[in-house]
Amino acid sequence: MSVAEETVTPRLETFPAVLLRNAKIWRDRPALREKDLGIWQTWSWADTLEEVRAFSIGLAELGIGRGDHVAILGANRPRLYFSFAAAQALGAVPVPVYADSAADELVYILEHADAKLVIAEDQEQVDKILEISDQLPALREVVYDDSKGLRAYDPTHLHAFEAVQDRGRAALAAESGRESAWLDQIALGRGSDIGVMLYTSGTTGKPKGVMLSNDNVMISAINACETENLSETDEVLAYLPLAWVGDHLFSYCQSYVAGYCISCPESAETMQTDLREIGPTFFFAPPRMFEALLTSVMIRMEDAGSFKLQMFHYFIKHAERVGEDILNGKPVAFMDRLKYWLGEFFVYGPLKNNFGFSNIRIGYTAGEAIGPEIFRFYRSLGINLKQLYGQTEASIFVTVQPDGEIYSDTVGKPSKDVEIKIAENGEVLFRSPGVFVAYYKNDASTKDTKDHDGWVFSGDAGFFDDRGHLKIIDRAKDVGKLTDGSLFAPKYIENKLKFFPNIKEAVAFGDGRDHATVFVNVDLSAVGNWAERNNIAYASYQELAGHPQVYDMIREHIEQVNEDLSKEPIMAASQIKRFLVLHKELDADDGELTRTQKVRRRFVAERYADLIEALYGDKEEQFTKTEVVYEDGRKGIIEATVKLANAKTFPFEKQAGEAAE
């Protein structure tokens, strides 16, 4: 460490300042790992500081300074994480962008963000930028990480990451005061400065640029680390999109605050293998991943021998009975503990190792509701899995489940320093140090979302139960009414359907109608495996989705949900009377899902208006045409005759003393 670093002690209000601290107190501890060509490469905190410093000064040589916006486009790579601190050290604002964004999405975000420089992962991302560069008036330079395929490109405004670092090192060597000047820039940083700009997923319109200050994300990270006792000894796998607020907090902010190591998988395809090799202690995954892992295990177990299958089910049943009590430290009989220990040896331990969860101390899931059975399954194995509720505008943390108070039907209690209140219309409002500064270039939306007292209108409807835990019903704007005045909450119904492993996605309709209907996407992996075991031949998703036996299977699931709904007075009238299995999977490239895999409900309703109207008629099938976008950007048309089917509904007692149905 240089003399300048030892004598200059900037306030720890920014992450570059924290990096200076980490390089001093945890100099040789691992900060980052990346698997490359099957071998894990490691950077210590001292290495990280050297990488960040060289690149940051190189960026300054390219003209990047305080207030400039630097877009970061790619998957989880150490150099892209270095880029955050490198930009922030200069007072510039990093703007991560989803790596799978199509060209038109990139045009909007990069033009709206006034991105002066883009740091791109590889040739694929560079090609996207070059294709749209004439539509980006603020863009001056592009830097790339992986040079494969780029050597013949015009280098005028295109630079290799190493070349930028070399410029930074050359400037350090040539100018005796350059390092001190760089440290002075870090010292100028304040907690009130904008530290990062993250774009919302855009479920209802164009994405909005959420400006988060250094204080917003720093205080949120510190509070989270204190709550979960995260330290420099923890390990995290960084595999979620850089542009998502969760990855920014978990993989960047918290790693700096706590000093723990993050590991970048070799690729999306090797993520599960890399997860097993790293064995993280802190892990986040959306419900879909936990559901997919469990589905894959159940599929494989169907092909296991009789003895192995019986042992698996025997010990899993025992874990479901006593596992959560053991995890929560509750009294459990000695024989039950002994049997659980045997289960750990024969089933639970190997299963957790297969998942990559052997060392997990804290696990989070959020974004969608997770099925109670799935939630209990993982917790029964001894995995301390919790639900949290958050938003980009909150620096993610609004509520989290405290240890010992884990319920599958809630999202927990307010996180540290978070205040929550419920408006008269049922909307959840929150206020905290993590609340965003404003939407970039969008004062109207800022005023609509955050009032003058700092309360944020979440857009979600919910309530506190008698345990003080928050329950989320649905998006407030999506909660409607049937024609008889009964409450209709589509997300609540959809989540119940998605608890079945055969159902990947569901979209419910019913607002302003006399009953509820639903579109269903089947899970190709689960249903495909079922079809193979039952000798059902199919050549495509469309053919499988339309198979009569698949319809029978989905009908059974829907009728189970209807029976459950009939026992819930508030939701009983929203039982599903008609359904269809959609002829194609909902896809972000087709505009039907956001990049965070949330349904764009209004878009889906407009695109499939003919199918919705058919569901509310008496037709048994409906011909439809749908435009799709292929991976190479070409567009095409899928034609299908979609079957429409009825489902059984159940009697219920109406509220307010009305007659039963």
Image (cartoon, rainbow, N blue to C red):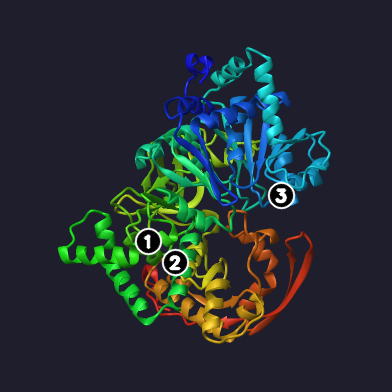
Q: Name the residue under label 2.
A: 294
Amino acid of disc 2: Leu
Disc on the earlier residue, 1 or 2: 2
Q: Where residue 622 sits: x, y (%)?
A: 69, 80
Amino acid of disc 3: Glu
Q: Which mark is residue 105?
A: 3
Cα distance between the residues tagged 1 and 2? 9 Å
Mark nearer the viewer, 3 or 1: 1
Mark nearer the viewer, 2 or 3: 2
Judge the density around disc 3: few (<14), some (14-19), many (≥20) Cα neighbours within 10 Å: some
SS at badge 3: helix
Q: Where residue 95 sits: x, y (%)?
A: 63, 38
| The quarter of the displayed image where residue 130 is located | top right
Residue at 51%, 54% (x, y): give it: 274
Disc on the earlier residue, 2 or 3: 3
Instruction: Give the answer, above or below, for where 124 lies relative to 22.
Output: below
| Residue 121 visible | yes
SS at badge 2: helix
Whether tag 1 and tag 2 are in contact, CB under 8 A, the answer is yes
Q: Where residue 167 sits: x, y (%)?
A: 70, 26
Q: From the viewer's perspective, tell me whether residue 606 is left or right of residue 289.
A: right
Cα distance between the residues tagged 3 and 1? 37 Å
| The quarter of the displayed image where residue 305 is located | bottom left
Amino acid of disc 1: Tyr
Cα distance between the residues tagged 2 and 3? 33 Å
Q: Mark 1 points at which residue?
A: 378
Residue at 66%, 74% (x, y): give it: 611
Instruction: Give the answer, above or below, for where 100 lies relative to 437.
Output: below
